[in-house]
């Protein structure tokens, strides 16, 4: 009785503090109409559009797509709006009554929409940061969303719904749930008891691929990560597959969803791309540098640890695609060898560290600096640490334990990890001090010590070198082969590394 009374007492207060959004696609105008309503507005309220979208570390110009800005009071009377800078509008609200701030967003992002919004006759896609402004000082308040849709339009989003509204606990979460509206093909499946959804969106509503076959592959490759972590922080997960490529081909991660833009082909070959974006639901959305949530949307946020956020994610993209049973161990070794080739063919690695490439990426397209990608070097660093931890612990621990430790420690709403916290965690798991290896790989431009991979029975063969166990055959590219003189102890570690 008392509990119900308290709930009834407090509920209206929470509702008052919510930020209410309304979204209406306007297909004829290839636009979206967005309204932000504040029931408890102050005399001055500031509305801002983010300067970037989490997951893509490049400044965006979302403000260029925004027009027809209006602010009204509870009676519909116009309120004064002052543009303060290109991404911020200040509304004067002398009566301190409710405020409705609304604007139009041009939905012309390339393909079917990726970092921005795309509106077509029968569908629309919204990447939250491009479309929903936030209210200064109210980022942590609950956000609600009401959709006004043309008749017959479907909705796909991982955001929770309550009645006719969608609800997120704060703006960070709100814009981390992209929204697909209109016509698309939907499939459902379950992974370890968690409901999953895959939607296939084609401009002409005709996916060329075998949708059931592709969905079965997504199901299989979704299993290893959730098993490795022993669970997930999402209650449901959504794959949004855009079968059209605009300005960007690839994927973008979200906390309970990912969006992939690929050509409308048969087959789609999503495997490592899908696994990479999916793994991010743990590594980068939960295990993350402190600056990557809560976010400062007004400017670039720099961290030296994107090699871990992206590169280690890519390492697991290969390992878990293999672990899903979709490919064999030869595929895994040749895929990782291709990463070595890629890295070694670059020149920037000789002058910049992987931390430099993480910090300077904002000015260099979001993947690294010059031809040094923190994806590639980060993958190789993760692999070498995995081998070292397995050796140091007699095969009892691995990089998986580092990931699990960080997951338990960083899971939202906990803060992300500090800039020097990764090596501390690696050392704790390894039970030995690997700091000098860390300094060499992460904070120097020294050659990567591939010989350490022999600790898990793998040999890296350079182009022109004789391939062990092949007579006199020479490698014509970087290759990774099993050590023909492997000791029983190392063979056990290799078996552990390849276990699935
Ligand atoms: Zn990524």
Image (cartoon, rainbow, N blue to C red):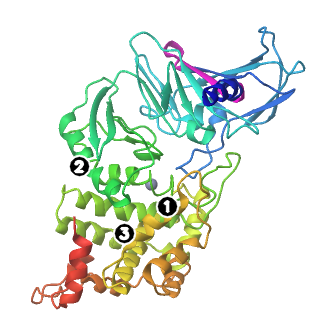
For this orientation, the residue located farthest to the left is 471
Q: In what quadrant does ligand 1 lie?
A: bottom left
Q: Mark 3 = which residue?
A: 342
First in residue order: circle 3 vs circle 1: 3
> In the rendered image, which quarter contains the N terminus?
top right
Please state which of the two labelled residues, at mark 2 or mark 1, is closer to the viewer: 1
Whether residue 22 is in magenta: the answer is yes
> Which quarter of the figure has residue 8?
top right
First in residue order: circle 2 vs circle 3: 2
> Which quarter of the figure has residue 140?
top right
Q: Residue at x 67, y 36 (%)?
A: 141
For this orientation, the residue located farthest to the right is 94
Residue 126: image location, x then y, percent = 50, 30
Q: Look at the image and give the residue range highlighted in magenta.
A: 16-31
Regarding mark 1 in the picture, which secondary structure is present there? Answer: helix
Q: Mark 1 = which residue?
A: 408
Please state which of the two labelled residues, at mark 2 or mark 3, is closer to the viewer: 2
Residue 230 versus residue 121 in the image, above or below: below
Taking depth in this image into account, of 212 and 223 the one nearest to the observer is: 223
Residue 369: image location, x then y, percent = 54, 65
Residue 12: image location, x then y, percent = 69, 23
């Amino acid at each position: 009785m008392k509990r119900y009374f308290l709930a009834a007492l407090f509920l209206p207060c929470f509702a008052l503090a919510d930020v209410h959004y309304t979204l209406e696609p306007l297909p004829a105008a290839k636009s979206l109409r967005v309204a932000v309503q504040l029931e408890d507005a102050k005399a001055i309220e500031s509305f801002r559009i983010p300067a970037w979208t989490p997951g893509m570390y490049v400044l965006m110009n979302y403000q260029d797509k925004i027009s027809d800005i209006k602010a009204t009071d509870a009676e519909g009377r116009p309120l004064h709006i002052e543009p303060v800078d290109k991404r911020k509008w200040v509304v004067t609200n002398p009566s301190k009554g409710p405020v409705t701030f609304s604007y139009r967003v041009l939905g012309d992002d390339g393909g079917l929409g990726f970092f921005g919004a795309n509106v077509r006759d029968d569908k629309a896609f919204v990447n939250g940061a491009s479309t929903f402004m936030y209210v200064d000082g109210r980022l942590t308040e609950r956000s609600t969303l009401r959709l006004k849709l043309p008749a017959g339009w479907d909705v796909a989003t991982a955001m929770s719904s309550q009645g006719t509204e969608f609800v997120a606990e704060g703006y960070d979460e709100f814009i981390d749930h992209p929204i697909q509206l209109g016509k698309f093909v939907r499939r459902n499946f379950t992974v370890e008891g968690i409901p999953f959804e895959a939607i296939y969106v084609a401009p002409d509503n005709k996916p060329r691929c075998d949708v059931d076959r592709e969905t079965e592959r997504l199901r299989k490759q979704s299993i290893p990560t959730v098993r490795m972590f022993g669970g997930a922080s999402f209650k449901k997960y959504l794959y949004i597959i855009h079968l059209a490529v605009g300005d960007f081909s690839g994927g973008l991660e979200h906390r309970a969803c990912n969006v992939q833009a690929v050509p409308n082909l048969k087959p789609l070959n999503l495997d490592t791309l899908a696994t990479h974006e999916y793994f991010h639901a743990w590594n980068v959305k939960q295990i993350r540098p402190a600056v990557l949530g809560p976010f400062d949307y007004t400017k670039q946020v720099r961290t030296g640890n994107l090699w871990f956020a992206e590169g280690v994610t890519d390492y697991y993209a290969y390992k878990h695609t293999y672990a899903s049973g979709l490919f064999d161990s030869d595929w895994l070794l040749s895929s990782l060898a291709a990463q070595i080739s890629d890295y070694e063919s670059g020149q920037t690695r000789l002058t910049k560290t992987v931390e430099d490439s993480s910090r300077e990426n904002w000015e260099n397209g979001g993947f690294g600096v010059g031809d040094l990608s923190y994806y590639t070097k980060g993958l190789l660093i993760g692999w070498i640490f995995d081998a070292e931890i397995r050796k140091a612990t007699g095969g009892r621990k691995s990089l998986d334990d580092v990931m699990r430790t960080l997951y338990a420690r960083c899971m939202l709403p906990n803060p992300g990890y500090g800039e020097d916290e990764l090596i501390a965690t690696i050392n704790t798991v390894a039970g030995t001090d690997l700091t000098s290896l860390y300094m060499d790989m992460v904070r120097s431009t020294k050659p990567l010590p591939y010989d350490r991979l022999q600790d898990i029975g793998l040999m890296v063969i350079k182009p022109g070198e004789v391939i062990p166990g092949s007579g006199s055959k020479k490698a014509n590219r970087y290759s990774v082969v099993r050590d023909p003189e492997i000791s029983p102890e190392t063979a056990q570690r290799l078996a552990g590394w390849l276990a699935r």
